[in-house]
């Protein structure tokens, strides 16, 4: 069953409000681990909503503050959600998904075999146009730090929600950038696979 029905009239999927998990921070830290084996079962819209909000959602609406820090408050990171039904860009302020491509691009998000069948792959993209008054090499470094903070948020959320995840840097960035129609100033930092814990043989 499809978790995200395509709305070809608006190309937008509104996400339900995220439900916070009851696990304590200590419990989430104890459970936090990398998993590379996922069941093929799709995530629910509520689970996708929770993962995305934890990643880089708005937690202080009055200021637009996010769940993860960003250097100099640039908020330069863009989060793409790659699912079997298509690929969306996460609009944190509206808490919704905006359709990028109505095709399955999961296999393009990494070079390991499992990424093509993981129910959800997140791609973290730095928009260098938002990073002002900084050297080029520092843009790359700071975007890496910011994407790492986002990835750890996802780890902790998944640990609390009973989901599996692994962050990845082994990516054909040129191929994936073309698939996502990225601009030359937008650079892929990391990707992260999410799903239900599968059996390990």
Image (cartoon, rainbow, N blue to C red):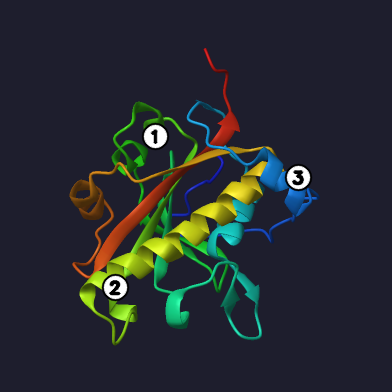
Q: Position of residue 28 (x, y in %)?
A: 70, 46
Residue for badge 2: 138
Q: Which of pointers 2 and 1 lies earlier in the amino acid sequence? A: 1
The numbered disc on residue 115 is 1
Q: Residue at x 59, y 39 (%)?
A: 43
What is the distance, in whole Å, between disc 3 and disc 1 at their CAs?
A: 27 Å
Mark drawn on residue 27: 3
Q: Nearer the viewer, residue 179 or 129?
A: 129
**Image location (x, y in percent) of residue 63:** 61, 85
Labels 3 and 1: the sequence-earlier one: 3
Q: Is residue 82 left or right of residue 128?
A: right
- Could you tell me which residue is drawn at 79 percent across and 51 percent down? 24
Q: Nearer the viewer, residue 167 or 163?
A: 167
Q: Earlier in the sequence, mark 2 or mark 3?
A: 3
Task: Report crowding for label 2: few under 14, some 14 to 19, many 20 or more residues within 10 A (C-alpha).
Answer: few
Between the C-alphas of marks 2 and 3, the distance is 35 Å
Q: Circle 3 — which element?
A: helix
């Amino acid at each position: 069953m499809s978790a995200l029905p395509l709305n070809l009239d608006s190309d937008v999927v509104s996400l339900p409000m995220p439900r916070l998990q009851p696990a304590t921070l200590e419990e989430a830290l104890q459970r936090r681990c990398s998993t590379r084996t996922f069941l093929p079962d799709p995530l629910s819209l509520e689970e996708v909503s929770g993962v995305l909000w934890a990643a880089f959602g708005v937690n202080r609406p009055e200021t637009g503050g996010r769940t993860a820090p960003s250097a100099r408050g640039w908020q330069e990171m863009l989060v793409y959600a790659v699912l079997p039904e298509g690929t969306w860009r996460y609009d944190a302020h509206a808490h919704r998904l905006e359709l990028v491509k109505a095709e399955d691009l999961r296999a393009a998000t990494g070079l390991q075999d499992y990424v093509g069948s993981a129910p959800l792959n997140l791609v973290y993209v730095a928009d260098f146009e938002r990073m002002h008054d900084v050297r080029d090499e520092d843009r790359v470094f700071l975007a890496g730090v910011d994407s790492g903070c986002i990835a750890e948020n996802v780890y902790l959320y998944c640990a609390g929600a009973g989901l599996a995840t692994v962050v990845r840097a082994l990516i054909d960035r040129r191929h994936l950038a073309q698939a996502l129609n990225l601009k030359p100033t937008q650079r892929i930092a990391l990707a992260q696979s999410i799903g239900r814990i599968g059996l390990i043989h």
